Amino acid sequence: MKSKTTLLILILLSVYFCNAQTPDSPIGGGEFVFNPERKACLTPEQRSDIGKTLQTNIKKLQLQNRLSFKEVKSGNHPLFIWPIQKASNIDYNDVWAISGYVDHDLNFNNNLLDYNCGSITYDTSNYNHQGIDIYNWPFTWKLMDDDGVEIIAAAAGQIVAKSDGEFDRSCDFNTTTPWNAVYVQHSDGSVALYGHMKNGSTTSKNVGDMVSEGEYLGIVGSSGISTGPHLHMEVYQSIVNNTLTDLIDPYSGTCNSLNTDSWWANQKPYVNSNINAIMTHSQAPNVFPACPTTETTYENSDFDISEDIYLSAFLRDQIANTPLSLKVIRPNGSYLYDWSINTTTTSSSWYYYWFFPVDALGTWTWEVTYQGQTETYDFNVTDQLGIEDETLEGTSIYPNPFDDIVNVNSTAKIKKASVVDILGKTILIVNKNSDEGIKELNLADLSNGMYFVTLEGEQQQKKTIKLIKK
Ligand SMILES: [Zn+2]
């Protein structure tokens, strides 16, 4: 269940900074807010129907002497592994974030209490959220289209019900369409519901078949009451009188009113910051198209030297006011940019992007560090157009180091010169369309230090030269 909010400020920044490469300020980005209406994934009627179906199937299996659970309490509940797995065709670091836990405050309508005494849950429309919502991030629909996020059995058990064939691109709560789901009963009689699966993706196994821990169950989708691809996982101790009974919150925590011990083999931290992906793009990624349109990533790692490079970072569990360190590293190991920004907002998912010109051929590295985790992404810069070498190869600037004025020595006509400082901030742009073009630059106003001047010819060919002001 999701919607999206691109911060207005960032949109404004993106317009404002269109022509000024300023690493200090991301030119775009925003927050992916999942289920802002805080509504339920499953209606009471749907849950009641599920209870009846499960009971019917369990009785049938019993009659066939195929029921794995023997109704003699073995005592121990299962210990779950994480029910989400990145598919082998996806090269992001990670593919999920959490939008909601079980609500432990039994009052409705914005009386929210998760196991950790926070408010990461939903309860609007006289209902308390009874499961965990784990959504795809980044590029949530693209990941669904690519079968990129697999739902796997958190514990071994027997499939006691399964449904498929339902529409899987739901965008709102005003639907009664059922979800695609797989239901697994564990050896202690407890049952896990895995819902919202992609149409046609559920396991080929049938009711009565056993699944092992970690076995594929389906693909994360948006079937049922949902506004975006996510897994809703809900767990009950038992089924009594056709009813799912004794809800479990797998997380142990001070405010878990249902059970004291964790059902996770390794319970993940409440704040679980992660760099889910970093990449480069040929243009700004379309991260939040109208639901259910698939996002366009524009991911690209091969550029011409004349192109601007878009660089992005997609975070999970961003913490407000924490540093995000960023580096754009040349093929020779030197830094084109080395800077950091402070995050503004605490959010389960957030992304940033920037764009810069580059000044050398070869394999570059985009490096992002957050909360002690460093990720790198390589991209190649070549001279595909071949213009620069032909026409600006011999172009030079002198004197260098300089005092006030530098001369431009070029056989080609230079129509534009832009000067950026070491932080990438544009200091000066000169345009000249006269016959002779730009022959000198007056840089008397610059303070001492290092600069990069990018000269541009009539065919948009470019050359960037490092300058030192004495
Ligand atoms: Zn849910």
Image: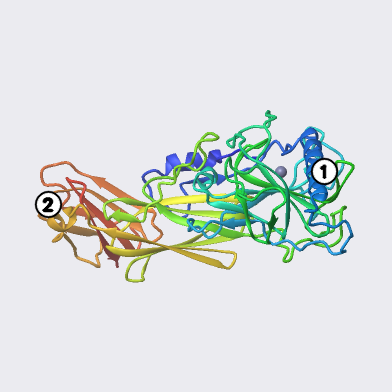
Give, as a three-letter code, the residue at label 1: Gln
Mark 1 near mark 2, Cβ–Cβ under 8 Å?
no
From the viewer's perspective, is the residue at label 1 or at label 2 nearer?
1
Q: Quadrant of residue 464?
A: bottom left
Where does residue 109 sit, x and y in percent of width and height? 80, 36
Where does residue 209 sit, x and y in percent of width and height? 69, 53
Q: How many marks?
A: 2
The numbered dot on residue 283 is none
Give, as a three-letter code, the residue at label 2: Ala
Q: Residue furthest bottom?
A: 333
Q: Does any atom of ligand 1 lie closer than 8 Å to the CB of label 2? A: no
Q: Is residue 91 above or below residue 58?
A: below
Residue beneath the point at 54% across and 35% down: 292
Residue in front for this viewpoint, 167 or 461: 167
Q: Is residue 225 left or right of residue 66?
A: left
**Which residue in the protein does label 1 denote?**
55
Residue beneath the point at 35% across and 64% down: 364
User: Quarter containing ligand 1?
Assistant: top right
Q: Is residue 40 above or below residue 67?
A: above
Residue beneath the point at 13% across and 56% down: 390
Q: Residue furthest front?
A: 64
Res. 449 in view: no
**Which residue in the protein does label 2 denote?**
412
Q: Is residue 122 above or below residue 365?
A: above
SS class of the residue under badge 1?
A: helix
Q: Is residue 313 left or right of residue 317?
A: left
